[in-house]
Amino acid sequence: MYLHWCFIVGDYYKIDLIFVSIIWKYWIKFQAPEMPWPDHQWALCIFDDAIEYGGPACAKYQEYFLQPMLNYVTDKSAEVRQAAVYGWGVLGQFGGEAFAGW
């Protein structure tokens, strides 16, 4: 799944999360427990991209993605687990100091 179009590339490949800010409220609904596993995967992939391409700027959205990423690491769907674990990897690599304690 390629959702990188959601991000606007600025100088020096820094990412502006303006567009993500606009659509974030819609993607959050995909992570609800009653939603099917593909919706969980989509939500996690959006979060993963925001972390990977937004870097430390993603910290302002952590209240929306940290708990779902943690919860879905043990999901029964392999695709959901993979997206959750990938999110933790990019968080460690690109998240910055705000996430050093995780």
Image (cartoon, rainbow, N blue to C red):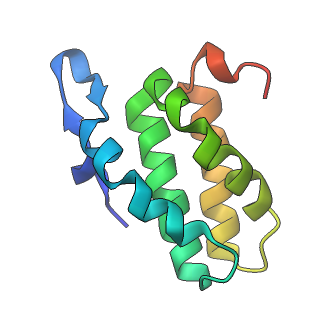
Question: Taking 70 as reference, is 31 above or below it?
Answer: below
Residue 102 shown left or right of residue 79 in the figure: right
Residue 57 horizontal/vertical position (percent): 44, 24
Above-or-below relation of 91 to 87: above
Residue 38 position, x and y percent, is 53, 80
Horizontally, is 101 left or right of 62 in the view?
A: right
Q: Is residue 69 above or below residue 90?
A: below
Residue 20 lies in quadrant: top left
* Relative depth, front residue between 37 and 85: 37
**Where is residue 78 drawn, in percent x and y?**
69, 75
Q: How many marks?
A: 0
Quadrant of the snapshot with the N terminus:
bottom left
Could you tell me which residue is drawn at 17 percent across and 24 percent down?
10
- Left or right, 11 with respect to 43, comes to left
Quarter of the image with the C terminus is: top right
The residue shown at (64%, 18%) is 98
* Residue drawn at point x = 70 percent, y = 76 percent: 33
**Above or below, 72 relative to 18:** below
Q: Position of residue 30 (x, y in %)?
A: 52, 71
Which residue: 60% across, 82% down? 35
Q: Quadrant of residue 81?
A: bottom right
